[in-house]
Structure formats: C-alpha cells, structure tokens
Image (tube, rainbow, N blue to C red):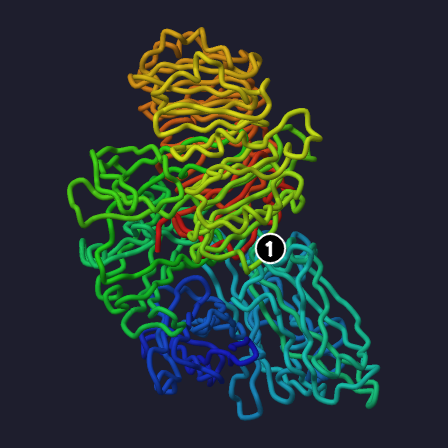
Amino acid sequence: MISSSDLFATKFPQMADDGVIDQDELDSEGGVLFEVPAYSDAAVGDYITFNFDVEKSFYLYLESEPVNQYFPWSGTVPQDLLIDGSYQAWYTVIDYIGNQAASPISTVFIDRSHQGTLPPPTFPEAIDNVINDSAAVSGGGTPVAIPAYANIAVDDNVLVYWNGFDEQNQAIPDSATTVAYTVKAADLINGFTVTITTPYITSIGEGTAQAWYTVHSGSRIPERSVNSVPVIIDTVCECLPAPVFPDGTDGWIDANEALNGTPLSVPIYSNMRVGDIVTTYWQGYTSNGVLISAAYDMQHHPVVAADLVAGFSVTLPEAALYAINVGYGQAYYSVDFTQSASTGTSLTAQVNVDTEHCTCLPAPTFPEAVHGVIDTNAATSNGGTPMAVTYSPMQIGDTVTLQWTGYHNGSLTPVPGAVFSLTVEVNEANIRANHIVIVIPTQFILAIGDGYAVGNYQVAYRAGGIGYSEDGDVVISQKTQPSIKVMGARTSMHASGQSQVGRLCAFDALTGTPMSAYWYYEGESPATATHSFIDTQPSCPLVVCNASCNTDLITLNPSNITGNGGWSDDETTSGSFIALLNDKSVLGWGNPQYGGSTPPSCYNQSVYALYATFKAFAFLHNSGSVYAWGDSQEGGAVPSNILSRSDWLELAAAEGTFACRGSHSPYIQVWGWGLDGDSPFNLNVPSNIACMSDLVSLHAGDNAFATVSAAGRVYAWGDKTAGGSVPSNISCLSNITSCCSSRRAFSVIYGCGKIAAWGDSDYGSNASSVSWVQNASRLVATESAFTALLSNGGMACWGYNEFGGTMPSQYASRTDIVDVKATYGAFAALCADGSVLTWGSSEYGGNSKSVSSALVNIVSIAANATSFAALKEDGSLVVWGNSLYGGSTCNATGTLEDVLAVYGNTHAFIALKADGSVVAWGENASGVSTLPTMLDGNISYLKK
C-alpha cells in the first residue's frame, strides 16, 4: 500500500548550483526540467501525476515490468507558461488498488536575469554576518529587512526569496522558501521586515543563505533587488523529520477534511524520550504567499510512552484552516529534549488548502453506455465513446484532466494500452452546455476486451483550489448490447387493495425516444408490438424485443421489491421492505416487528414471488412451497399443513391474513388473523370455495377475500360488511375479467367493460354513478374510492368523494389517460403526453400544484400510502404528498438519477437504478435509515 512517507521530493537539476533557474538554464532545456525519483513499492498499475503549481500537470502510468525502467521520470515544463517567481511542485501516486499518496511540496525559483537594481535585503539578527541557533529559533525565525527602496508605495506586493547552501555551495532544497508582503503606510520611511521561519534556517546547518526580493505593483514594471551578501548559517540545532498531514494524501486539505479540524502527525524522531516537550506550529498563507494571521496555531505536547511506538497527532483547529479559503499551510515542530537539554527543529511540511470547495466531485458519465455497458458498436462508432463531466461551480478557465483506465474482469491491474488521459480548459461552450465531453479513442476501449473501465477527472479551479471526482464505472463488452431501455416498476404485491398493476414503457437506450417492442413472458410467444405494457404476471421474467430486430432484446427480472406497513398515518405503523436478490434469496429491512428482517437461510432460496400483509411477509418458492415471517398473529407464521405443501400457485394478502391458491384440494387455504373465532368475522375458507378446482385469481380487502374462476364467476368470504359476501346480482355473472378492492369493498369488470361493486357503501360499493360505463379496462382503488380506466383513454370514478370518488369536471372529458395510481386517499393519472392529473385528498397527494411545472415527460408513477413519485424519461424523479413519508427526497440515501423503477411501502419509497444500486427516502424507521448496503450490485432490473 502506497503512503506519502514512501515518496521523495521532486528534483530540479537546474537549481542544484545556485537554487534558482535563470534564462540560460530555461533555454538549455526549453523550460523547467523536473525529475521524479523512484519510490519504494512502485508497482505495475501505479498512476503518477506531477503538478507544477496549477499551471501544468504531467502523467505517467507504470504499464509493465520492470518498473525501474520508468525512473527517474523526467519532463519539462515549457518556459512560455512561466513568469519569474516562485512555484510549488509535487506529485501524487494512485496505486493499482486506488490508494493515494502525495510527495513533499518543493519550491522552484525562476529568475531569468538573476540580477537586480533595488537595494539588497539585510539580516538584522546576524552578528558579524552570522546567524546562530539563537537567532534561528527565537521569535520563530530570523528577520530579513527590506529597505525603503526607490518609489516604494502603499500596496506594493513584495516577494522575498530565501535560499540556503551547504559548505560546498550546493543549494539545499529544504531551505528554499518565499514570503509575501504588502507594503503599508508605516513602511514608506524605514522599510519593513519579514520572518524566515526556523526550519528554513536550521535545515542548512552549517553553510550560507542568500536573499533577494521582487516588487510588483499595478503602476510599475516588476523590479528585482540585488542579492544580499551571503550570510553565514551556523546552527547545531538537530534537524528532525517533517510532520505529516494524514488527510493530505492528495496534496490538499479540502472543505470536508477541514471540518472539525484536521490531524497533524509528528513521527518518531531520533532520541525521542518520554518527557520531551514538542511544540507544533501551523501557519496559513494565501495562494499568493501572504501570511494570514488568523490561520495560525501552536500546541505543546509532552511525549508519553505510547508516542514512542508510532509518534502522535495533534488536531489543527477548523478556524485555522477555514481562515485560508484557498491557499496553503506550513507546519513544523520543535523539540526540547528532556535528556540532553538541547533542542531540535523539524523540516517544514506544506499542504495545499481549499476550504471553498469539496474535492469530491460527481463521477463522470458515459452517454453511450446501454444498461451500464459499452459494446463494440459504441467503441468503434465516431472514433470512440464519449465521457461526460458535470460539476459545480464550473468556470471558464478551469483546467480539467480526465482519465480512463481499463481492467479485465476480476482484476485490479490496468490493461496495457487501456489507459488514456486528456487535459482540457473549460470554455464558454462548456458553460452553456453545463458539461464537458471528450471522446475515449477506440483503441483504448477495444484493448480491454471483456472487462470494465473506470473514469474520473481532476479540476484545477481558475480561482484556486482543486477537486477530484468519484469514479464512474462502466462495463466493456465485445458483444453488441441491446438498444432497448425499459422504465417503470413491475407490479408489486401489497396488502388489502394496495397492489397496483405496473405499466412499463420501452425506449431507445441511446436517444431516449419511445420504441415499439414485443412484450411476452418467458415461455410465451410475442404478440402485438406496443410502446407500453401492463404487467399482469409480475413473478415471471418478461422479455422485451425490439419490434424492428428480433435479436435485439432484454429480459426483465420478476418483481423484486415489495413493502408493508399500516394504512394509518403514524409512526406505530412504520413499514418494512423485502428485496428478491439476483441469487433468488430475500433480504429484509425496516420495522423488525413487521418482518423487516431476513428469513432463515434454510427457507431463503429459489424464491419465486413476494407478498405482504400489513405486518408480515411471505414468498413462494419455485418448488411451489410457501414461507412467511413477521407478526405471527397477522400472517407471519405458516401452519404446518400449509407449509408442507408444494403446489401453491399464488397468494393474496388481507390486512393480517394470507390466502394461497393451489393446484390440489383444498384449492384455497388461509393463515393469519380472523381464523380463531376471536374476531367479529370469520376468514376461514368456506368448503364450497375451497373445493373449487377452476379458480384462477385471488384478491383481498382488509378483512375479506374474493376469487374469480375460469368461467368468470366471483366468490367471496370474510367480513360480510366489507365485501365478504357477493350479492346475487353479481354472483350470477359469468364473464368477469378483472377484480379490484378498496379496504372494505370489491369492484369487478364484466362483459365488454361494465362495472359492478359490492361491500361497504362508505368504501365504494355503490357503483351506480358509473352504470353508463361500457368500456372499462382496468380498476384502481384508494382506501375508499375506485377509478376505472376506459378503453378510449377516459376515466370514471366513484366512492368516497374526499378520497378520490369524484374527479374535477375537466378531467371527465379526457381521452388520453394511459395509467392511474392511488395512495390511501388520492389518485394520480398519467396522460399520453407525459403530464399528470391528480385529485382526492391533498393530505395524500391529491394536489400536485407545488410540482406541476416539473410534471412533464413522465413515464411512470409509483405510490405509497401518502405520497406519489413520478419517474421522468431522463431517469429523474418528481415527488409530492406527505413530505415525511416520501413526498420529499431531502433524506434520500443517494442520488436519484438513472432510475428505472420505484417501489413503496406505506411510509417510504425505494428506487432501483440502472447500475443495480438502490436509493431510499421517506420515513427513516420504514427502511430508509437501515437500507442495506449489500443491495447494491445484488439486485437488478434486468435479468443477468
């Protein structure tokens, strides 16, 4: 694992003799020559970035063995990019498994003429031209005096240079520093002094130092002083290793790292003893090198026994970091040795600071990736595939370096020939488009074969500071990928009328335009090609085939998320979620009393379909057996006579009771609440119904069940006041095609589209107001009202007015309705043009005015008990309703983009994204705060 302590400072051969680079030296190399030395643990796959201030970056990838062939790595920073002055240079290494480290920061002086006209600086504390330990240490360093030069003026910017040399007159890199100063009125007569801090003096030991200064002002041409007379340095203070910034492994302390302070680590030094007094110093500067008085910190630390093992750390206070904004900081420490009564001073450690930005930027995206895959077509068309970058704030003049690295499947070692980088400068067109797009050339994609690639980027802000992006991953495949993208949730089976049929839509995966497709369940044959599809068999894999190409197809996984929870709007009914993973096991979370846990492993395999009562979950196995868990009184415990059977075909769930339909007698059995005679009704299956062999579907209200036979007859049992008894005028019907329930009523479609209903009159059992309907095609219910979708795109409503039983008059004439979803007390209708109509109780999402401008290009709507979530063509979401229970995404666990489907329990939502990750929002106790991280990558919309 690479660490900053493994890295040595960059070398600059042109500075070796006198510590500066002059014009002749620039001309001889065409600029500034740098050398990155070999470091320990260098390995194939390491990626090195050399930064010369923020003016220029260079890159090296260690592609093959032996890695020593790459070192020393040298390059030249073009001189036309550089004016005279001081520059900071460092490099970072990202190893093949993603660990990052930064080298020490080096100071580079460019001084083309190396001559000046202004009077030289002097050294007030030098006695007989000697700076000794006392002068070097007292006051934190030694002063350099700048005289009142000709035409000195207030607000002149003066940059003072200091450079040290050993006794052989060779420059000492650790001694080089600059100090910036802005002239004040008080300086106009006698000049001023700046302080060279102790480490830049003691690092020389015995040798000499020289200083000079340059003056910069808007009213004058930059001028340089004559060099000072070399001053003798004679210090015996022990020179100790520099401290370390653990959070600065990329060379920066960003806004997040500065929050609550950042650690400064003091390593084990020579002759470290318990009782030594270590004093740490921190000083911050602007990006121009001006000292910031508020960015100062000093701390004393007595060495204890534990420090002798690995050193120790102090925390630099947040205020001393945030005072810098964008600039840099320097730290060092001094030691009063307890054993020898002598002192020591460390070298200086420097780190860039940017408390204005967070260095963690959004990952790049790959617009041509279909279902997260770039195939041969995308790799070869138009010379490669695009990588897009969007970050904020993006400004003209920002420098963005983008990188692409390819890997074989299962490997962390980059593929030779699959590493590409490009540096661009943000221009006006990028600002208008709010993104940068580059093309990854074909050869860097095809070199991967079957594998994956990681894209990322670095931003050097024009105003100062730097940012690094998250990684964006994409699968690389030599196979041509399907061009189809399907959006919308598959039908999810909930309790007591909460189940709502899913509507799915097909689009061109690249252009986003609607596509005509054949839809059929595995084992069936294609029928008519359509853009959308109503999902009536959610437990079956669904094949979607491009109508223009019968080999261009995808298969959707069965419905793989469902939830539960009570109807009422309070925390005692917090819900849970369960998810059917790609390995056909189930993962549960949320309210543990309602089944928010994972079932035992002995049952948790080969799962086929998911179901829920208010307080329990159940699933069917591929074998036809059933298992349940949760509240044992309300469906969470399966009786042995039901558990032992393996012929079950489907389940339905009432408030606290499950019913299951099988292929052998008794054809229907139940378990849960309402079976023991303690309830005011009896949910045991009547024998005449249990023995019927031609039943084809089950349906449930709160405390009643209904079943439809192959002949189209409907039968019911349970609470007679809640639909548990079918009236004679409906029981005689023999052509029922659809059945739906509110909490306490049932409704059916029969004949060519007529409607009938029965149950509690307060819950929608009186359908006389829609007796005129002859063309109903689907039914949807709130707690106490129904809406029928008509074959001509119209709607008809009845039931409790406040909960959606009456819609606005202007909706009645619409003939463009393609789908309707319902919460506990409101409806939302999706129109063919992608707009949305709502009605019912505003408390339950019946008023969408607050988001009306965003309700465009909607392709699918999801609902929980109190809120709606509308999925847009671009994969983003619009939500409204109860803000605590999903009507706001403020507590979303991730970014809601590239969403394919949304599912709900009663108090929360969960979004399934194209990359197989999930995001939850709503009530924390309903599975949001406990969203399992292992879901990501283990559940997917498409069948693997």
Residue 123 pos. (x, y %): 66, 75
From the viewer's side, name the closer residue of 518 and 421.
518
Which residue is most to the bottom? 168
Q: Local crowd at mark 1 within 10 Å, few (<14), some, or many (≥20)?
A: some
Identified by mark 1, the residue type is Asn
Residue 812 pos. (x, y %): 38, 10
From the viewer's perspective, is 414 left or right of 768?
A: left
Q: Residue at x 61, y 73 (%)?
A: 349
Residue 933 pos. (x, y %): 54, 55
Q: Residue at x 38, y 74 (%)?
A: 413
Residue 929 pos. (x, y %): 62, 47
Q: Quadrant of residue 452?
A: bottom left
Mark yes or no: residue 357 visible: no
Judged from the image, the secondary structure of the residue bearing numbered disc 1 is helix
**How many numbered tags mark residues here?**
1
Q: Quadrant of residue 241?
A: bottom right
From the viewer's side, name the closer residue of 38 and 942.
942
Up/down of 805 relative to 87, above or below:
above
Up/down of 194 relative to 909, above or below:
below
Q: Residue at x 51, y 77 (%)?
A: 2
Up/down of 42 relative to 789, above or below:
below
From the viewer's side, name the closer residue of 174 and 775.
775
Mark yes or no: residue 181 visible: yes
From the viewer's perspective, is 756 left or right of 208?
A: left
Q: Residue at x 32, y 41 (%)?
A: 486
Q: Quadrant of the C terminus?
A: bottom left
**Residue under circle 1?**
256
